Amino acid sequence: MTKQPHELALMAESGRLLASVFEMLDRTPLAGLSTLAVNDLVERFIVDDLKARPASKGQYGFAYVLNSSVNDVVCHGVPSASEVLADGDIVNLDITLEKNGYIADSSKTYLVGEVHPAARRLVETTYEALWQGIRAVRPGARLGDVGWAIERHAKRNGYSVVREYCGHGIGREMHEDPQVMHFGKPGTGLVLREGMVFTIEPMINRGRRSVVTKDDGWTVVTKDGSLSAQFEHTVAVTTSGVSVLTLRADERSAKAM
């Protein structure tokens, strides 16, 4: 479950490369692009520019390199040529990357054009909730502390936390132990130890937390049609706290830190 120093170094490199994918997307006008076009752009960048492997492609039979979850889609949205991003949309892009045998996993919810203030507030609060969870990570803390910090922040702002999907350990495999819930009670759950690597990836709804899966077997949407947002980072437990392996350049001096 814990990684050795040489493994952590390789995971940090995968995380750095994955962060650069999002930095590329930050420079890309998304309005007017189909979610399939975004998928293809990301695949070319990972394969041709970074000389890495998009780890989601082929995983569990999934045919694409990312999940594109627009508006009321909670997670696992499937890229499509007919789904064109428009002014006012919010879209979570969830991307994985493997380099030298180790996988990093991260996601970001983008605001497309001029977004309604209510949608912007949901996205901002979800990002803050992610960081509340990250700040709870340190040796000797428990996974319940992480989930509690996330859910407390969401509820204080009037939102609900999806419970059916969670973060996960990661390394040579996409999904390893432990499972990282985004709700919980302080002082409960697995004790965190130096060398553990896992994702934190809260999905937060503007309405109720209930979700349903569409007939495609992948796309998960809010049951009440409300907006949903998500952010994700891959983190490692260090001697003194936590290292965010997928940290982007724009976050290094951000208030979230």
Image (tube, grey):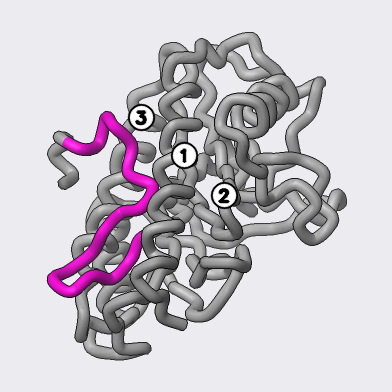
CA distance separating discs 2 and 3: 34 Å
Image position, residue 96 (x, y; %): 58, 48
Q: Which residue is mark 1?
A: 17
Label 1 vs label 3, nearer the camera: 1
In magenta stretch: residue 226: no
Considering only vertical position in the picture, is 182 above or below 105?
below
Task: Give the amino acid type for the residue marked by disc 2 in the picture.
Answer: Lys
Q: Quadrant of residue 151?
A: bottom left
- x and y, in percent, of residue 149 in the image: 25, 67
Q: Quadrant of residue 250?
A: top left
Helix or strand or loop: what does disc 2 sit on? strand
Which numbered disc flags the more N-terminal residue, 1 or 2?
A: 1
Taking the spot 25% from the left edge, 36% from the top edge, the residue there is 251
Q: Position of residue 30 (x, y in %)?
A: 55, 16
Q: Which mark is residue 99?
A: 2
Badge 3 crowding class, 10 Å Cα cut-off, few under 14, some 14 to 19, many 20 or more, is: some
Q: Nearer the viewer, residue 142 or 204?
A: 142
Do residues under tags 1 and 2 come within 8 Å of each other at their CB atoms?
yes
Spatial separation of the CA atoms under disc 1 and disc 2 = 9 Å
Read off the residue under disc 3: 120
Q: Mark 1: which amino acid?
A: Leu
- Residue occupying the point 21% across, 69% down: 136
Q: Few, some or many C-alpha atoms within 10 Å of disc 2 (few <14, some 14-19, many ≥20)?
A: many
Q: Which residues are magenta?
A: 235-252
Q: Disc 3 marks which amino acid?
A: Arg
First in sequence: mark 1 vs mark 3: 1
